């Protein structure tokens, strides 16, 4: 995934997540280092 100049990227999940639940994400670099978890984002569509 590539980010824009502000560091934002969009994506869609290939799994069902119930509306109202929270999801988080991490990023992994080429050396296998991971970022902290993102702030939770509430699912609004299904």
Image: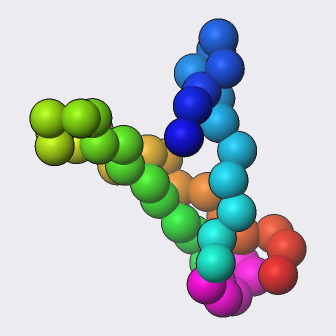
The answer to whether residue 38 is left or right of residue 35 is right
| Residue depicted at x 64% and y 15% | 6
| Residue depicted at x 68% and y 53% | 11
The answer to whether residue 44 is left or right of residue 17 is right
Q: Residue furthest front?
A: 30
Q: Is residue 33 above or below residue 25?
A: above
Q: Quadrant of residue 25?
A: bottom left
The answer to whether residue 7 is visible is yes
The answer to whether residue 36 is visible is no
Q: Is residue 41 above or below residue 6?
A: below
Image position, residue 39 (x, y; %): 48, 47
Q: In which quadrant of the rendered image does the C terminus lie?
A: bottom right
Q: Which residues are magenta?
A: 15-20
| Residue depicted at x 57% and y 31% | 2
- Examine the residues drawn in magenta and state their main secondary structure: loop
Q: Residue furthest top?
A: 5
Q: In which quadrant of the rendered image does the N terminus lie?
A: top right
| Residue depicted at x 71% and y 78% | 20
Q: Is residue 2 above or below residue 1?
A: above
Q: Quadrant of residue 16?
A: bottom right
Image position, residue 8 (x, y; %): 64, 29
């Amino acid at each position: 995934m590539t980010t824009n100049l502000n560091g934002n990227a969009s994506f869609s999940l290939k799994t069902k997540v119930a509306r109202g639940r929270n999801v988080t994400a991490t990023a992994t670099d080429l050396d296998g280092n991971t970022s902290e978890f993102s702030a939770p984002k509430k699912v609004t569509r299904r």
